[in-house]
Every structure is written in structure tokens, then in C-alpha cells.
Amino acid sequence: MRPPEEILTAWNQFSDFPMETLTKAWYFAKSGEVKQRPVALMKEHQAQFGASGNCFDLAIWLLDEFQKAGVEAYSIGDGSGRGPDARRRHCAR
């Protein structure tokens, strides 16, 4: 199965990004209460330092890019009611 072009375009933006934990550890140590960087800050750090983040950072960023591309995507357990459990409940009716 070949993915649609909008998925490939969003996905390929991350091809040169390393998945690393140093940025996450640095931000976690300096951030205070908020531990998750917003996508805008991740983009700023990537442009400024070439840093990306760990798998959670990259997944959040990828979901943001999918949303901008019009691709229906959701995180598992995001509380939105759109995840796999909600779909199963809906289909079981």
C-alpha cells in the first residue's frame, strides 16, 4: 500500500532530524512546570540549534504537520474521542 502524497510530504520533513533525548533533558531541567515543548518552540530549537527531540516530541510535531496537511490523525489516548477505542465503540452500535 502506498501512502497518499500529503502523508509522505509531512513525514519526509523529518528525514534529517535525529531522534535524541538531550534536548528533552535540557528543556525538562530548565522548563519549570511545563515539561512538553509546544510545536512552535520545537521548530525554533530545530532552526536555531539543529535539535529535534525524543520520540514524543517528534510524534507531537508530526501530528501537527498532518493536521496542517489535512490528514486525519490522532494520538492514542488523547482524550478527544477520535482514537481507536472511540471508533470501536461507534462501530459496535
Image: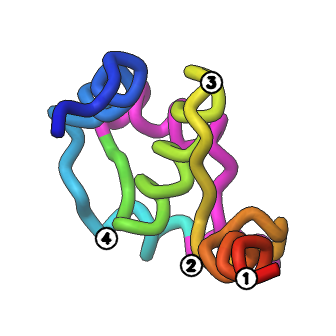
Give 20 or 73, whichever is nearer the viewer. Answer: 73
Rendered location of residue 58, percent (x, y): 41, 53
Rendered location of residue 59, percent (x, y): 45, 57
Q: Which quadrant does the N terminus fall into?
A: top left
Magenta residues (range): 28-50
Q: Amino acid at mark 2?
A: Ala
Please report the residue visible at 82 percent of the width from the left and 80 percent of the height from the top: 93
Q: Label 2: state its secondary structure.
A: helix
The disc placed on residue 70 is 3
Residue 11 shown left or right of residue 93 in the figure? left
Q: Which residue is mark 2?
A: 29
Whole-number angstrom distance, CA of label 3 to CA of label 4: 29 Å
Local packing at callout 3 (Cα closer than 10 Å; few below 14, some 14-19, many 20+) is few
The disc placed on residue 21 is 4
Q: Comparing marks 1 and 3, which lies closer to the viewer?
A: 1
Q: Which residue is mark 1?
A: 92
Whole-number angstrom distance, CA of label 1 to CA of label 4: 40 Å
